[in-house]
Amino acid sequence: SCTDGPNGAYHDDESIDMITVSTVEGGPLQAEAMVVIEAKVWAWQDGSADTADFYYAADANDPAWQHIRSRGAGGFNLRTLKVEYELPVGALQAVRVNYRYSGSQSSCAGGRWDDVDDLVFSVAAGSAAVAVAAASIKKPLPVPPAEPMPSSHCATIDRMHKDRCVENSGCKWKNGRGKGCYPKK
């Protein structure tokens, strides 16, 4: 299991409102079907430091989380983020969204503002060829490493959020005259 970060408030900081899984073609959830995971999330400030990591597990009872893709919030307030993947073989599956402030891609990053939610759902067996092809299920493409936070983000962190500045690896907190969050040099 994975717990949410200890900080944050609903619709003030990073939060996940809803996760849905549906087929791209509109049919039933069955093995080998292309599906879309849709996560409705709340972005903090301008959302530039917020990222959703999407995962799936073919067996919800014993999940081995497989990374699909990560998506930046791309703006502020309520956002809808989507990724597609091919459903593997498995009667009871799960998806996970780890919505995080800064940090690195992980199925359970443990950040102070992270919100992590899972969705468990049933999947039909699909065609007879599914059982034969189970060993050759397409895996998601490798994900490139996350880009570092732009230094311009540091200036958007106000004086009330020193903890967010300190947690961001590209920023540093300055005390005294000119107190605030600045890019590391």
Image (tube, rainbow, N blue to C red):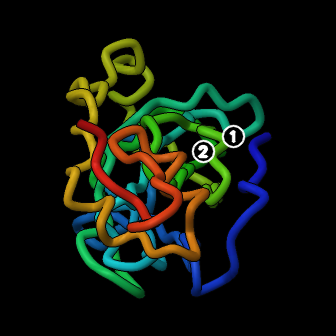
Name above or below for residue 8 compared with residue 70. Answer: below
Specify the amino acid type for callout 2. Answer: Gln
Specify the amino acid type for callout 1. Answer: Ala
Q: Earlier in the sequence, mark 2 or mark 1?
A: 1
Task: Name the element at disc 2.
Answer: strand
Q: Is residue 82 visible?
A: no
Q: Residue at x 39, y 32 (%)?
A: 128
Residue nearest the observer in this picture, 167 or 10: 167
Disc 2 to disc 1, C-alpha distance: 5 Å
Q: Is residue 165 visible?
A: yes
Label drawn at residue 60: 1
Q: x%, y% of residue 122?
A: 62, 55
Q: Residue at x 43, y 65 (%)?
A: 180
Left of 151 or right of it: where is 91? right
Badge 2 crowding class, 10 Å Cα cut-off, few under 14, some 14 to 19, many 20 or more, is many
Query: What residue is disc 2 on?
Result: 93
